[in-house]
Amino acid sequence: MEKRVIYEQPLNERVRSFLRLEHLFNIADHHLPQDSQWDSRIAISYLLEILDLITRSDLKSDLIKELEKHTITLDVLKNNPNVDHQRLNDILSNINDYLNTLRDSEFQPGQSLKNDELITSIKQRVSIPGGTCNFDLPAFHHWLHKPAQSRHDDLNNWKQDFLVIQESLTIALLMLRNSTTPVIENAESGFYQQPIESKLPCQLIRVFLPDDCNYFPEISGGKHRFTIRFMEQSSTSSRPVQTDDAVEFELHCCIL
């Protein structure tokens, strides 16, 4: 099977926040189980970014709205005889469990990080270039030299109350990405434009290209249309330019 690279462009602020949060979780999850102190440093820095994003945005409310919308969509499928009703009921049950937790006023994701003295001291220094050196934070230096399993236990504990957010986010984005029928399109001279139906507003554009492709898409969009320009960059030191070639690509307009 041909290897492909997926490029995504959110068309509203909610999906933009979701994708950024997913990106942070993916990086944190990659480094969290690793044994080196450098991986532990990176895992903590991304947990702090996750906390910052959740704190600054109304993410809980956005996830609740998105999951409620999905339950309405899935409820309609109960009348479809071609649907696996057991699987459908399991998905709905999971979503309702997440909704109950998210709606609980006592659920405050990130509290274990906020209440931790070591994390608080790291957070105060992490924005300073080189601010978490061993002479700046000897307590952090000491923690980093603890056995790997001890650090893993702490990291997993700090991440624990993010799990409902992460799992809710995974379901919301999975359903959004699967809400489309892929089409093959052609961009003449590297340019493609498509209007957006007002009754079915697109939330996410996805472009699939072979991983050995010489082009990458720059996607922009508004309420009425979106545009894709396929760019070439001969080296990292040169400015990207729009290609003169016709580019065939797979397009997903995700509407849910």
Image: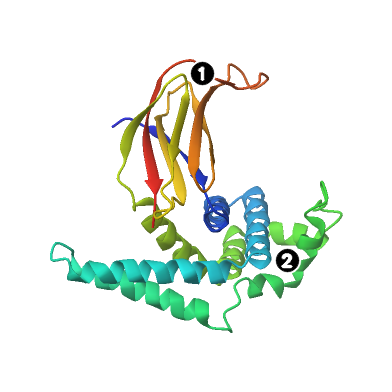
Indicate how the structure is coloured in the image.
rainbow
Which of the pair 211/155 is nearer the observer? 211
Residue 116 visible, this angle? yes
Q: Amino acid at mark 1?
A: Thr
Disc 2, SS: helix
Indicate left or right for 126 with 234 as reference.
right
Q: Residues within 10 Å of mark 1 (few under 14, many from 20)?
A: many
Q: How many marks?
A: 2
| Residue at image mark 2 | 119
Q: Residue at x 57, y 62 (%)?
A: 152
Residue 51 in the image, given as x and y percentages of width and height: 65, 64
Give the residue number, with chain letter if any, for mark 1: 243
Label 2 – label 1 distance at C-alpha: 48 Å
Q: Earlier in the sequence, mark 2 or mark 1?
A: 2
Above or below, 215 against 39 in this view is above
Nearest the viewer among 144 and 59 is 59
In the figure, 120 relative to 212: above or below?
below
The percent position of residue 80, horizontal first and vertical second, equals: 17, 66
Outermost residue, right side:
135
| Residue 92 or residue 196, whichever sits in front | 196
Residue 119's spot in the image, x, y percent?
A: 73, 66
- Does 49 sit above or below residue 116? above
The C terminus - image quarter: bottom left
For this orientation, the residue located farthest to the left is 81
Is 4 positioned to the left or the right of 102 in the image?
left
Q: Amino acid at mark 2?
A: Ile
Q: Is residue 203 above or below residue 142?
A: above
Q: Position of residue 6 (x, y in %)?
A: 44, 38
Closer to viewer: mark 2 or mark 1? 1
| Circle 1: element type | loop
